[in-house]
Structures are given as C-alpha cells and as structure tokens.
Amino acid sequence: MNEDEVEGVAIANLIGADMRSVVGWVYRWNTGALAVRWDVSGPQRVSGVQPDLKNAEKREIDFEGLKRIRRRSRG
C-alpha cells in the first residue's frame, strides 16, 4: 500500500435478515478506521457479521443500529 493514499480491505461480510445473504462488507482502511460498504441494494437490516468482529469494532460501525435498519418499501 502507498502510505500517501487511503486504501481499504474487506475484513468481514454483513449477513442480511435472511441469515444467509451477504448484504455488505466491513472495510478496514489503512488509516485504522472501519467503514461499511453496502451491495447494490443499499442499506438493509443485518443479522450478523462473518467472521465475528471485536466489540469495539462493532461499536465503531454501529452494528446494533445496522440490526435495526427498517426495510425499504419497494416502489
């Protein structure tokens, strides 16, 4: 990695409400920050994360909030 550029790597899959679909990813940036990237459907309720993250990492991405995302109505 080039130290002058911000780069990230996926460290975990976000599992959807159906308990099997990958709906997004948790990325760790070379700055140390964590961020969520969603699939093409956008933000949606999460039931779990694989592999599991440390509690501090879950707090950083507001994992509890991700578990409460309301289902989007289909237009």
Image (tube, rainbow, N blue to C red):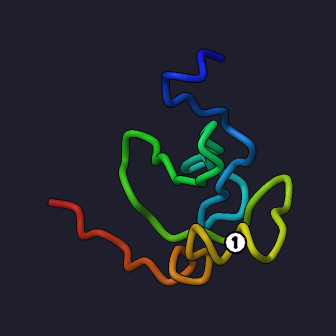
Q: Name, please, the residue furthest toward the top.
A: 2
For badge 1, the amino acid type reads Lys
Q: Where is residue 13 in the image (x, y as percent from the top left)?
A: 70, 48
Q: Eyeballing the image, is 35 above or below 18?
A: above
**Label 1, on which residue?**
58
* Residue 19, quarter of the rendered image: bottom right
Q: Name, please, the residue furthest toward the left.
A: 75
Q: Position of residue 38 (x, y in %)?
A: 46, 48
Q: In the rendered image, which quarter contains the C terminus?
A: bottom left
Q: In the rendered image, which quarter contains the N terminus?
A: top right
Q: Where is residue 49 in the image (x, y as percent from the top left)?
A: 74, 61
What crowding class fits label 1: few (fewer than 14 Cα within 10 Å), some (14-19), or many (20 or more)? some
Horizontal side of residue 61 vs 70, given as left or right? right
Horizontal side of residue 22 vs 43, given as left or right? right
Q: Name, please, the residue furthest toward the front.
A: 4
* Residue 20, quarter of the rendered image: bottom right
Counting labels gives 1
Horizontal side of residue 35 vs 52, given as left or right? left
Q: Position of residue 27 (x, y in %)?
A: 61, 44
Camera-nearest residue between 20 and 3:
3
Q: Eyeballing the image, is 43 above or below 69?
A: above
Tag 1, which secondary structure?
A: helix
**Residue in the picture at 51% in, 70% down:** 45
Q: Eyeballing the image, is 69 above or below 40?
A: below
**Residue in the picture at 65% in, 55% down:** 14
